[in-house]
Image: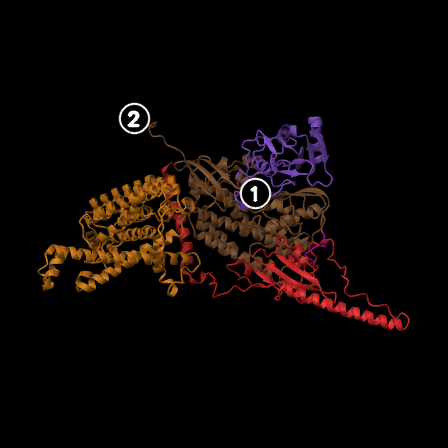
Chain colours: A purple, B orange, C brown, D red
Amino acid sequence: MEAQAIFDALKGKFGDAVVELQSEGFSPAFVVVAPAAVKEIARFLKDDPALSFDSLMCLSGVDYKEKFAVAYHLHSMKHRHAIGVKAFLPRENPSLPTVDDVWPAANFHEREAFDLFGIAFEGSKDLRRILLPEDWEGHPLRKDYKYPDFYHGIKV
Amino acid sequence: MEALAKSLVNAVPLLAGVPLWAVTLLLMVVVAVVILVFALTFEGVGSLVLRKVAGDIQARIGPNRVGPNGILQFLADGVKLVLKEDIIPANADRLLFQLAPYFVFVGSFAAFVVVPFGVGLIAADLNIGIYYVMAVTSLVVVGVLLAGWSSNNKWALLGGMRAAAQIVSYEIPVGMALIPAVLIAGSLSLQDIVRSQGGLLGVFGWNLFHNPFTFFSFFLYFTAAQAETNQTPFDLPEAESELVSGYNVEYSGIRFGFFFLAEFGDMFIVAALATACFLGGWNVPFFNADTLPWIWGNLLSLGVFLTKAFAMVLIMMWVRWTLPRLRVDQLMRMSWKYLVPLTFVNLLGVSLWLLLFKGKGIPGMIASLFG
Amino acid sequence: MTIRTDALPTQEMTINMGPQHPSTHGVLRVILTTDGEVVTRAVPDVGYLHRGLEKIGERVTYAQFMPFTDRLDYLAAMNCNCAWAWAVEKLAKIEVPERAEYLRVIVCELNRISSHLIAFGSYTADMGAFTPFLYAIREREKVNDLFEMICGNRLTYNYARVGGVSGDAPPGFLEKTKEFLDYFEPKLDEYNNLISYNKIFVHRLANVAVIPAEEAVAYGLTGPNLRGSGVPFDLRKDEPYSVYPKFDFKVCVGTGERGTPGDCFDRYMVRINEMRESIKIVRQALAQIPDGPVLAKVPRVFKPPVGEVYFRSECPRGETGIYLVSDGSVNPFRLKIRTGSFVAMNIFEKVTRGLMIADIVAVIGSFDIILPEIDR
Amino acid sequence: MGLKAYLNDIVEAVVTTAKGMRITARYGVDPKEEVTLQYPEERWEIPDRYRGFLHNDIKKCTSCTMCVKVCPVDCISLEAVRGADKKMVLAFYDINIGRCMYCGLCVEVCPVKSLTHTSGYEMASTDRGELILHFIHEDAAEVKARVARQVAEAAAKAAEAAKAAEGTKAAEPPGPATPKPAGAQAAAKAPEVPSLGTEPTPAPEKKE
C-alpha cells in the first residue's frame, strides 16, 4: 500500500489527529500525527488487516533545534510495506504515551530516546537510562547540550 | 612392609641395634617420598603433555619457549605458582580457606598407596585396596566444598555445590563398575586383581575380554571416573565459561597449585585403576615377570604398567579437547538415569556369568577347549 | 517430622554476571536473581561501551564518519561500512559503478562468513568445547588475509567510500578468494560432524529459550535470530539493495531440527547454513564481476540534499538500520543506528525466565550479540 | 520415556562422540596442520596496501593542511611560515600515532601524495611522547627565526634595489615599474572552504 493510501486511511479514521504527510525527500514517507493520539494510531496500524504493521523497525528521537520529534519506522511482514510516523513535541519537558504494549520492541528504543533526549514516555513498562549511568545529568544528544566538566571527579 | 624391613635388617648388619619398628617407619617414609616425587613429576609433566596434546589437536604448537621444545614449561609453571602471592579474600573464612587445598591434595595423593606399579612395587598391598580408594577419593568432595564455601564468592559457592552433587552421585557408578574385577579376582586387593589377569592367556587374560559385561563395565567405569575427577565433559565445578572457574576462583599462588596438582593426581589414579582392574595391570603379555631376577622383573612390569596408564591418560586428554560440557541437571540425569542402572545390570550380568561358567571367561573356556 | 520451612528462610541470590565475564561477548552486565541454579530474573544492563557514536556523527562529515562505522560492529566492519555508504547514497541519490557494487557484495559476504565463524567458535567455547573455536579462528585468519590484501587492514577495514570503494581488487585477489572458498566449503561439514550434532551440544541447545515466530516479530528481532524462529525474512531477498537481486541463494530458516523451531539450536544452525549460502553468493559474484571504475565522481565538499532516509541492510547480527536526517550541511543533522544485537537484548529478560545459569550463557551465544553494536 | 528412546540416546551419544573424536584425532596426529606463526622469528609478509604508520616526505609536502582537516581524530598538526620566495616553509609537522586509527583518509586526500603508509607496525612504547612522530628535525622556533631572518634580508635587499632603482629613475625618466616589495604578506590564505569531501581519485593511485 502506498504512503498516500495509508495516510488517507489514517486521516479518514482519526481526522485532525493526523496532521500531514511528509513524502518529498523522505525515503519512507512520514505521517505526522498529534502526540496525544500516538497510542490509538499505533494500535490501529498494528491491528488493521489492510495495514498490519506488526514490526517496529526503529523508534528514534530527533532534536529539530526548535522542537523535538519521535520518529517511528514501521514495517509489515505480511504486506511487506513500510511507513514512518512522526510526532512533534514541544521543547520543554517533551512527553508522549508509550507504545511498548503495542510493539514490545519499543521498550529499549524508548529508554534510549529518554536517556539521550529526555523524552518521557508515559505508561512505559520500565523507563530508566539505558546507555548512560543512572546519575548522569543532562541528555547528550540534544543540540544545546553542554559537556559537564567532571563526573564523579573524572574529567569528562 | 615388616617383611621387607626384616630382610633389610639381616641384610645390613649394622642396623641390628635399631629397633624393628624404627626401621619399618623409616622404610615407609622412604617409600612415601619416592611415591610423592613420582606423583609430583607426573602431575607436572602431565600438565605440559595436556597443553601439548591440546596444541596438536587444535592445529597449533603448544608451549615451546621454556627449554628445548617447551620441556621445562611445567617447572616454569611450578616456580610461578610458588612465587605468586597467594591472596586470601578479605572476609573469607580464613581457616577453612587455607585448609581446603590440603584436603583436596591429600584426597588425591593418598590413593597412590594402593596403585600396583609392578610385581613387588606397591606402597602397601592393602587387602581392602579398591574399597580404600573409593573411601579416600571422596575426601576430595570435602575439600572442594570447603573451597567453594570459604572463599566467600558466589561463583565459588555455586562451583562447590556443583562439585559436591557431581562427585557424590558419580561415586556409585564408579564403585559398581569396579566390582566385576573384584568378583573375578575374588579379592579387593589390587595386586590380587592384577595377578588374576596374568597367566599364559596374555592379552586375553585381561578382565576387559573376560566376558561382554566386563567389557561394558570398563567403558562405564571410564565415563563415570571422568565425571568424578571433573574432566571436561563433566567439568562443571570449574566451568570456565559459566562460573568463571568455579571453586578455585579466589585461589592463587601455591594454593591454586595444589588444586591443579590434585586434578592431575586424580587423572592418574583413574588411569591406574582402569589399567589395574581391566587392562591387566603390570602383567607382561605372554610372559611371567616373576621368573626374571628381582630388579628386572620389577622394572619391566613398571614399564608395562606406566605405558598402559599413560595411554589411558592420553585418551582422557583426547576426550577433554573434543566434547562440550553438560548442564548440571543433565549431569545428574546421566548419573542416576543412565550410569547407575547400567552398572547394576552389568553387575548382575557378571555375577550370573561367573555363576554359570564357574569363574572362567570366554578366553579361559576357549583355552580349556584346546587343553 | 515436618520440615519447618519457615524457620529456614531461603533467600534468592543476586549474582552479577558482571561486565567482566568470559562469555558475555563483551562488556554486558546481567543481574541474575537465582534460586540455586535456576534463574528467576535476568536483567541485562548495557552501556559500558557507549562511545556516543551518534553524537560523533553530528560533528564529522559524511566521509569522515566511515572509519567510525568500523567500530560499530568490529566483527562485521565491512557490512557496517557498506551500510553507511548505501544509506548516504540513497539520501544523495548517487549512482555507484557496477564493479564497486560487486566488490562490496564480495567483501560483505566474506565478512559475513568470518563473523559467523566467530559466532560459531565462541558459542562452542561457551559450551565448553575449545577446539572448534581454534578451527574457526584459523579459517577467519584466511579471510583476514584477503581483507588485508584489498584494503590494508585486518579488523577496521574502512574500505567502502560514499560512491564506491576505496580501491580496486589487487591482482590475485579474486583467485585467492576462490581458493579460500574451495578450501572452506568442506570445513563446514567437518564442524557439523565435530560439534553441531554432538549429543551433549544438542542437549545443551535444543528446546532452550524457544521464541515463537510472532513473538520474534513483535520484539523486532532480525537476521538469524528472526529466521531461527521460522520467519523467512532476509533483507537481501525481501528488500533487495545493491546487486543482490542478481544472485540466487536460499534463505535459511530454523526448522526445529533437534527441538522446537525457534530454540537456540535453530539460531545456531541458521548461521552455519548461512555460511554455505554466502559461499554460493561470493562464487556467483566472482563469476559475474564486470570491469570498470570503482569510485563515482563525488564532489569534494559533499553536501547531500535536505531530507530524511531510513536504509537497512542485512548484517550478520541482524538488520543494521540507519536513520539519517540531513539539513543540507556538510555534517549529518541526526544519525540513528539501529542494530540487531540491541533488539536481541530487548527480549533477553523475557526469554531467560526460569532457565539455568548455564542456559544464560547459551542464550547470549545463540543471539550472537556484540556489545559495541548495542551501546554504540 | 520409552526404552527405545533410552537406548537410542546412548547409541547417539556414543556415535556422535566417536565422530567428533575422529576429527580431533586426525588433527592431533598430523603435524603439518600447525598454523602458528612464531612471531619474532617468522614475520608476516605484509601486502603492499597495508596501512601501517604514516610517513610524510617533507620535500614534497606543500603544507596545504588538507590532511589536518580530513583526519577524524585530528592527530596531524603542522605549522608553516611564508618563506622569502613566497613558498611555505614547514616549522613543524607532527603525527600523533598514539591517536591515529590508521583509517587512511589522509593518504587519499593528500594532493601531492607525500603522505604515505609505511608497512611498520611495531612502535609500542612506554611513554606517549615517543608516539608523536616529528617529521621536521629542527626545532620549530629556529625554523621560524631562520625564515624570519631570510624574509628580513630579502626585504632589505628589495628595499635597496628599490632605492637604487629610484636613484637611476631620478637620473632618467621612469624606468620599468619597480618590483612590488617582496615583504608584503601574500594573501594566499588557505582556501577558505575547508575541502573535506574525499578528493575523487578517478583511478586507483598506483597503476598495477
Q: Residue furthest right?
A: D173
- Where residue B7 sits, quadrant-wise, is bottom left
Helix, strand or loop status at disc 2: loop
Give the left or right position of residue D132, taking residue C333 as reference.
left
Q: Report the amino acid beneath label 1.
A: Gly
Residue C8, placed above or below residue B87: above
Residue C311, placed above or below residue A11: below
Residue C344, placed above or below residue B208: above
Task: Measuring from the top left, give residue D121's x and y in whole percent.
Answer: 54, 61
Nearer the N terminus, badge 1 or badge 2? 2
* Dot 1 crowding, Cα within 10 Å, few <14, some 14–19, many 20+: many
Read off the chain for label 2.
C
Task: Measuring from the top left, give residue D122's x and y in whole percent.
Answer: 53, 62
Q: What stretch of residues is rendered in magenta?
A: C292-301
Read off the chain for label 1.
C
| Front position in the image: C95 or B180 | C95
Give the left or right position of residue B361, taking residue A152 as reference.
left
Alpha-carbon span between mark 1 and mark 2? 52 Å
Q: Report the amino acid beneath label 2.
A: Thr
Task: Measuring from the top left, give residue B368's x and y in whole percent.
Answer: 20, 54
Q: Which residue is mark 2?
A: C2
Instruction: Please tell me the numbered disc located at residue C340.
Output: 1
